[in-house]
Amino acid sequence: MPTDFRHLSEQLPDWVQACRAYAADGRVATYIPELAHAPQQALGIALHHKSGLTASAGDCGMPFTLQSISKVFTLLLALIDRGEQAVFEKVGMEPTGDVFNSMLKLELVQPGKPFNPLINAGAIVISSLIRGDTPEQKSGRILSFIRELAGDDRPSFNESVYRSEAATANRNRSLAYFLKDNKVLDEDVEPTLDVYFKQCAIEVTCAHIARMGLVLANDGVDPSTGRELLPKRYVRIAKSFMVTCGMYNASGEFAIQVGIPAKSGVAGGILAVVPGELGIGIIGPALNDKGNSTAGVHLLKRLSEQYDWSMF
């Protein structure tokens, strides 16, 4: 892999430039007003290899908020806090085939719990399971967890995005109150949503999520220190969800075309993992109709084809 990695490093700027053109086929998210300010044509990538080698290209230094990428890590933290049984009593393990903020299956399929932790309804429930006496304590623990996995204390809450999301989140409030009425959500709605909005508004760069992805690629162990940061069992659960549910209702197509665990967010970020090898962070704010970075998906497809990354 290091030989391939050197080749990848040399070719990466050209591939980023070629894939940047696909941004014209997408649209920057506007339903959270603050996200609408992102540059349509931006595309950046960072890769962290287990050997310690890194590579980056394009707009990789551009800060962006985690949005739904955070769901992978709150799931991990909830599993650490509560254990598998308590978590999966509240959320399922199956893809939905529906859009990420749909409430359709909550009403149609009993017992009315979210199908998985990576859709909005499931992530809201997961946020309620993070230990802490107050929303501030829970949010602080999530941020500390992200910083530890990123190997950097600079990730922080983007206050403008947090307030923009909180002010316009009528669908998420509807989901949360429905979950509360269904007795799936045990905590109060508004404090739980505050935790959820803040986790989505944690601001990072491609390098941060590449480093976080590398820890997942290495089954929870920090390759640079050999220290276990996450239990292997929980990392494997998270990566399984990334394969089956991580790219919204385009996860099956992504598994066929790219074939690696990944999680996207509506700010245009993508976290991807080549198991046993490397972590990848991408930013490309222009989204396709499924909510995934259109240029970012094309870039990952090109890289996976070039280096035979598919797990399948």
Image (cartoon, rainbow, N blue to C red):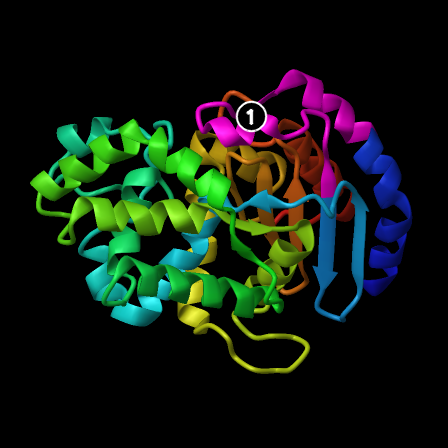
95 shown above or below 126: above
SS for dot 1 = helix
Residue 185 screen position, x and y as percent: 16, 49
- What stretch of residues is rendered in magenta? 18-44
Q: Name the residue carrying label 1.
A: 36
Tag 1: amino acid: Ala
- Residue at 41%, 62% (x, y): give it: 142
Classify residue 31 by image quadrant. top left
- Residue at 76%, 28% (x, y): give it: 20
Q: Is residue 35 magenta?
A: yes
Name, please, the residue furthest toward the top. 25
36 shown above or below 210: above
Q: Nearer the viewer, residue 262 or 178?
A: 178
Name, please, the residue furthest toward the bottom. 226
- Residue at 37%, 59% (x, y): give it: 139
Horizontal side, residue 104 vs residue 234: left or right: left
Horizontal side, residue 98 vs residue 177: left or right: right
155 shown above or below 118: below
Q: Does the rendering let one see residue 117?
A: no
Q: Does the rendering let one see residue 285?
A: yes
Horizontal side, residue 250 vs residue 258: left or right: left
Classify residue 65 by image quadrant. top right
Q: Is residue 143 magenta?
A: no
Horizontal side, residue 173 vs residue 282: left or right: left
- Residue at 54%, 70% (x, y): give it: 148
Residue 201 screen position, x and y as percent: 47, 46
Q: Quadrant of the N terminus?
A: bottom right
Q: Nearer the viewer, residue 133 or 112?
A: 133
The residue carrying pointer 1 sits among few (fewer than 14), some (14 to 19) or many (20 or more) residues within 10 Å by Cα, namely: some
